Image (spheres, rainbow, N blue to C red):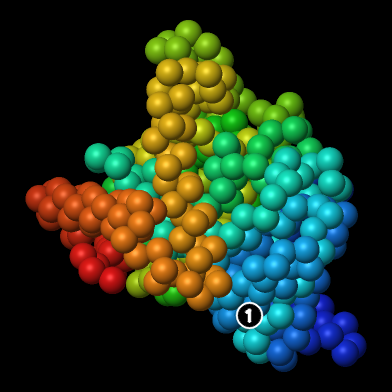
Amino acid sequence: MEKLVKNNWNRESGMPFAIARILNHKIHPEGLNTDRIRFFETGTFAPECNAGHIISVHKGSGMLHVASDNRSPFRLEAGIHLYIPPGLESAIGAEAGTELVKVSSASASQARGKKLLLRDETFIAACASGSQSLRWAFTPQYLSRRIFLHHDPVLLSKSGFPVSWYRTTMFDVAGLPQNEEGEPVFKMSYNSRTECNICYDVKGTARVRMSRHPYTPEKQTWGPWLPLDGDSTYHLNEAAGSPEEECYFDEATQAQQFYRNKHEVYIADGHVTLFCVFDPAPTGVENHRPGEYSDYEPLSQVLGTKSYETHQREIAKFDEMVDTLSLAKSMGVLNTLHGTPAWDLYRRGRETQVGIESELAKALAAEGNGREEVLAHWMQAATD
């Protein structure tokens, strides 16, 4: 199965947009359809009613029309993310230049969510409590916006797991630890997960390479470096139960753990922004330290625990704030919520997040590798 997919844009006669078909539910592990949509003229796109859809706007603007919702239409712009459930008749009227990414279930049975969700990253960026970022993960290597998580009622993969939907920017590798070949790289290995990475904003020189099996801690053999641009999707498609699946015995947990999707990314003089699907969706915070390979705690070790219950209670109030303020902004009535509990939570969360980022920059400056300069462009301002 191909590891790198290049967009093949197809514009049917008379249509205002072109579609690039990226993943097909019949052949890819997640069992989902993934497309990109690019408007060359002002026009309308109507998602199929017999499936559920995650739709993100990454460029341009438009309006979401929902037949059964008298609050409609809703204003759309870059940074808006939708979940449209099956059976909901809707249409997106978009201006020329608008671009969308869409992930769709193969049928209504793979759509867990039954309600429309609309989320604006403006408010996701303010989901921080204490020293923890609940939806806006800012690290020395990347900025990840966690749009839909394990507990969010959206889509299911064909394996029956809830999927998650992230938007992530990976930073220039300058100042990161080197790999065995002497290059600074971004190391990743999402154990027990399949994942597709839909790149659309690539600046500078960027490339990715995947490990060849077997995986080894040293002297790893690799596939070729694959160049990345704004029309690329790199697909980490080792599925559970596949011949490529490898495991090891974890002395700490006294259980078998799986290795999958080990890869490295190199970025010079720029960044890479992408959307990604996880199957199954992560539940906790990613363990990702510069120079080491990343993972999440296995679902079986997280679901049902006291710590996860506490996390869910904490994030619930932020979810409600994000959904309330996002919807109000899309309807043009956000100013009516100034001074409400939701608005106050947004302001406090933003202040907390700015503080978290400031402490991170100070810590990186003390290390002396220059990573704080790479992060500076992506840090939030103290005020709107």
In screen coordinates, is 158 left or right of 358?
A: right
Q: Secondary structure at mark 1?
A: strand
Residue 138 in the image: x percent, y percent? Answer: 33, 52
In this view, the residue in front, 18 or 366, is 18
Q: Position of residue 370 (x, y in %)?
A: 18, 60
Asked if 193 appears above or below 232 in the picture, the reply is: above
Along the line of sight, the residue nearer the viewer: 247 or 141: 141
* Quarter of the image where one finds residue 13: bottom right
In percent of the image, x 56 and y 20: which residue is there? 300
Quadrant of the image occupied by residue 237? top right
Find the residue positioned furthest to the left: 366
Q: Residue at x 35, y 72 (%)?
A: 269
Residue that label 1 marks: 62
Q: Residue furthest top?
A: 254
Residue occupying the point 65% across, 87% down:
95
Vertical comparison of 177 with 282: above or below: below
Quarter of the image for the C terminus: give it. Answer: bottom left
